[in-house]
Amino acid sequence: MDVVLEFFHTFLTQFQTPTLAFLLGGMLAAALGSKLDIPDAIYRFCVFMLLMRIGIQGGMEIRDGDIGVMLLPALFSAVIGMTIVVLGWLTLARLRGVRMDDALATAGLFGAVSASTMAAGMFMLEDAGIYFEAWVPALYPFMDIPALVLAIVLANLYLSKKNGGSGQRVAIWPIVKESLQGPALSAMLLGLAIGLFTRPEVVFEGFYDLLFRGLLTVLMVTMGIEAWQRLSELRKVAHWYIAYAFVMPIVHGLIGFGLGYVAHLLVGFSPGGVILLAIIAASSSDISGPPTLRAGIPSANPSSYIGSSTGVGTPVAIAICIPLFLILGRLVFDL
Amino acid sequence: MLNKAKKVVVVTEKVLLERIVALALAAGATGYTAVFANGHGHRGVRTDALSGHGDIFSNVKIEFITVSAEVAQKIIDEVIAKYFGNYSGIVYVEDVEVARPQQF
C-alpha cells in the first residue's frame, strides 16, 4: 500500500515540476490552436546550452576521475540501443498494417536518445538529492548511434532482399559521422573536451549551469507544441504505433534499469546512474535521429516514426518513465 | 541583349538539397538558387517550412538555369528516378531569358 501511495505522490510532485508543467502547457496551447511559437534559432540555442552544460560537467568529472569505470556502462548502453531495435523488429514490425521499414525506423528512433528527456531526468535526480556520476549523460552517443545504425542496416537488408537480393551494402561510417556531426552530439562532445582539457569552472557555474534550468523550460514548451502537431500526423498511420509508443518506453527503461543494476553489482555504478540510464533508455530521439533516418531509410514514412516518438514517446518518457524509475530506484536501492 | 535559356525548378524536402545540387552540377548545371518553400500538393499540406524544428519537414525550391536543353532534361530525369519514389517533390521547366549567357 505504501508503495502505491508513494507512486502517486511522486507522480503528483512530478506533475508540478516546471519541466513537465511546461511540456503539458505547450501541448495545451497547441491543442487550443494558439499561435505560440518558439523560433527555431532559439530552440537550437537551448539545445546547445543544454548539451554544453551536460558535456562540460561530464568532462570535468572524467578529468578528475577514472575513465575505466565508464567502460561497462558504455558497453551496456550500446547493448540497450541495439536490443531496442531488435525488440521493435520482433514486435511492431510483425503487427498488421505495419510496414517493415516504418517499424524499423520507429524502433531506431526509440533506441536513440532524447537530450531533453535526459536533462529532465537529471534535474529530477538532483532535486531528489540522489547522486549520479556526471559522466552518465555522456553515455548518450553509445546508445544513440548503435541503435540508428542497426535500424538503418536492418531496413536496407530487408529492402534489398525484397527487391531481389542485389542491394547495395550499407556504408556504416557515414551514418556514424552524420550522428557525431549533428548539432546535439557536437555540442556535447565539444563540452566534454572543454571540461576535460581546460578549466571552465567560472563559465560553467556563472553561465551554463545557471541558465540550464530556465532554458530547459523553453525547450519543454517547444516540445509540447511539437508533440501536439505530430500527434495529428499519427492519425494517418496504423494505430499500433500509438500502442508501441506508449508501452515501449517503459519496457526499454526496464531493460536499461536491469543492465544498470548489473553494472551496479559488477563495477559499483551508482544507484542514481542506474536510474538515469533507465531514463536514457526510455527516451526516444527528437532532434538528431529523424534526419538521419530520413536519409538512411528513405522509403519509411516520417509521419509514423516522428509521430510515434515526438507525439507519444517523449511525453510518456517524461511524464511516466521519469517518476516511475525514480520510485523503482528508491525501492531497489532503499534510497 | 537577352538569350533564351531553361530554368529547371525542383520543389522538394530540404534534406535533399545538397544531394540534388550535387546531382545537377554533375549533370552540367553551372549554379543554383535555393529558397525555403511551403505549400500544398498531392501529399497534403507541407506547412512547416518556416518554423519546423529540425529540418525534416522543411522544404526548398531549387532553381537551375542552363542554356542546354539536354542538361535540363538530364537533371529532371535523374531527380525523378533517384528521389521522387520516396520523397515528396515536383519538378518543372520554365523558358527564361538571361543576360550574359556565358554564365549559364
Image (cartoon, rainbow, N blue to C red):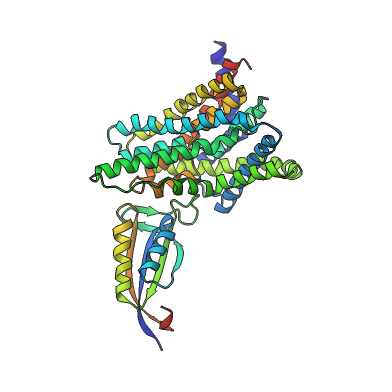
Hey, which residue is sitting farthest top in the picture?
A: A1
Seen at 29% across and 64% down, the residue is: B77
Q: Nearer the viewer, residue A198 or A309?
A: A198
Q: Nearer the viewer, residue A106 or B47?
A: A106
Residue B21 lies, in percent from the top left, at 41, 64
Figure check: A60 above or below B61 = above
| A161 sits to left or right of A74 | left
Figure check: B37 above or below A46 = below
Number of numbered labels in the structure image: 0
Q: Nearer the viewer, residue A98 or A68?
A: A68
Residue A103 lies, in percent from the top left, at 35, 37
Using the rendered view, name the quadrant where residue A69 is placed.
Answer: top right
Using the rendered view, name the quadrant where residue A93 is placed.
Answer: top left
Residue B58 lies, in percent from the top left, at 44, 55
Seen at 39% across and 42% down, the residue is: A152
User: Which quadrant does the N terminus of chain A fall into?
Assistant: top right
Hey, which residue is sitting farthest right in the picture?
A: A202
Q: Is residue B35 visible?
A: yes
| A50 sits to left or right of A287 | right
Hey, which residue is sitting farthest bottom in the picture?
A: B1
Hey, which residue is sitting farthest front in the picture?
A: A68
User: Which quadrant does the C terminus of chain A fall into?
Assistant: top right
Q: Is residue A17 visible?
A: no
Seen at 71% across and 41% down, the residue is: A210
Residue B92 lies, in percent from the top left, at 32, 67
